[in-house]
Amino acid sequence: MSKGKAPEHFSDIPAEQRREWVQGFDLPAFRANQIATHYFTHYNDDPDSWSDFPASARELVKSKILAKLITLVRSISCDGGTTRKDLWRLHDGVLVESVLMKYPDRATVCISSQAGCGMNCPFCATGQAGLTRNLSAAEITAQVVAASGACARGEMPGGPIRLSNIVFMGMGEPLANYNAVIQSLRNITSPQPDGLGIGARSVTLSTVGLVTGIEKLIEEQIPVTLAVSLHTPDDELRDTLVPINTRWKVKEVLAAADKYSDMTGRRYSIEYALIKDVNDQAWRADLLGRLLKNRNAHVNLIPLNPTPGSKWTASRKEDERAFVRTLENYGVPVTVRDTRGREIDGACGQLAAAEKIKDDTLMITSPNN
Ligand code: SAH
């Protein structure tokens, strides 16, 4: 099986071109609207169940318009069923994951934008494996449609709920797969039936800080929440923790994020994985506080989720508490992220890293399992 681009799909096509696109398959233009409604409003991609659709056109839809791009290999749950990791096989055998998290009042899905990642951050399991390939807009969107369907069908504890939040914090660097990610954002945020009708404010795009990407995103006028993976306030350490820092320095990344938040009028997040004795010292907390005190930013501290074989581990609780206090003293809003999904390798940076296909049987090789 050759690894490569996914077949073209309805949701790769911008909404305003879909009528013409379906006409290219000798369907009347109005069918585009029906297809969009089934897919984005009812999360249904099986034309055999569409009573308003001619039987003679169903095969065409299955093969050319809504080809199945992601196939569920397995789901694993933890946290009493409120966290569920789905492993998907793409048309070329490549694997990606998404994680669905149910809270009392909302449901969030964490999705992948690339298979693997080329950013090479040494503490991230995805980064260790390198980039396999970009996902298409439709492959990214399909993860969200699947999660929406799972929520609507009441597959998560507590009964049916609407999928409310999307975070681009699974595998991949979203701004390194720019065009596909933008089209997926349009699919997520456009009102039904052209999209899923999820507000841009409820979508978080997390980036290592590709400055040109952040600046382009400003132009798109899709006011998603921006998260910047900073991990340290000083360039010297950041050059090693987030290697793209050798291209765009901390100050440039923060300046781009500031511009972004001027456009949306909303706070951005600074992601900071606390690594014991690496980036959790009092002086770094102080420098971070000084850097952020006059910015429209919120710090999200993530206790490091150690990757298999890594020499690094999460900070001591007392160092984490001191870090929080220092930021609070500067008046910088700060939260410590919950560590859901760890026992199923569904946590930050761990997605799909533990899966190996062996003799066509999926083996979980992580010692955590
Ligand atoms: N490429 C994007 C999105 C991917 S991951 C980015 O870097 O922002 C989402 C977040 O998880 C990032 O902040 C990333 O740095 C963090 N992360 C990766 N590996 C981690 C680990 N082992 N422990 C804690 N956080 C991790």
Image (cartoon, rainbow, N blue to C red):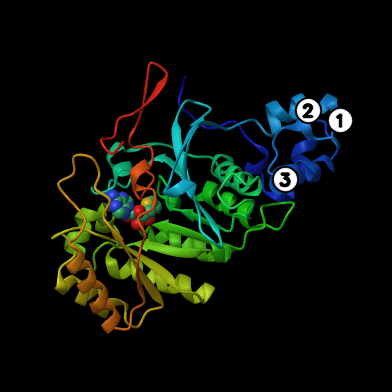
Tell me if label 2 and label 1 are in contact, CB under 8 Å: yes
The answer to whether one can see residue 110 in this image is: no
* Label 2 near ligand 1 (CB < 8 Å): no
- Please state which of residues 161 and 254 is positioned toward the viewer in this rendering: 161
**Mark 2 element type:** helix
Vertical order, 256 against 74 (above or below): below
- What is the CA distance from the residue labelled 2 to the residue labelled 1? 7 Å
Amino acid, disc 1: Pro
The kind of residue on which mark 2 rests is Arg
Q: Is residue 119 left or right of residue 63?
A: left
- On the image, the x and y values in percent for residue 196 come to 66, 53
Q: Which residue carries the number 3 mark?
A: 42
Find numbered disc 1 in the image and state the secondary structure of the residue it sits on: loop
Q: Measuring from the top left, give residue 177's x and y in whole percent.
A: 46, 47
The foreground one among 164 and 298 is 164
Q: Is residue 323 left or right of residue 148?
A: left
Q: Nearer the viewer, mark 2 or mark 3?
A: 3
Q: Residues within 10 Å of mark 2 (few under 14, many from 20)?
A: some
- Tell me the quarter of the picture where residue 360 sits: top left
Label 2, label 3: how many angstroms apart (C-alpha)? 17 Å
Number of the label disc, if any, that sits on residue 54? 1
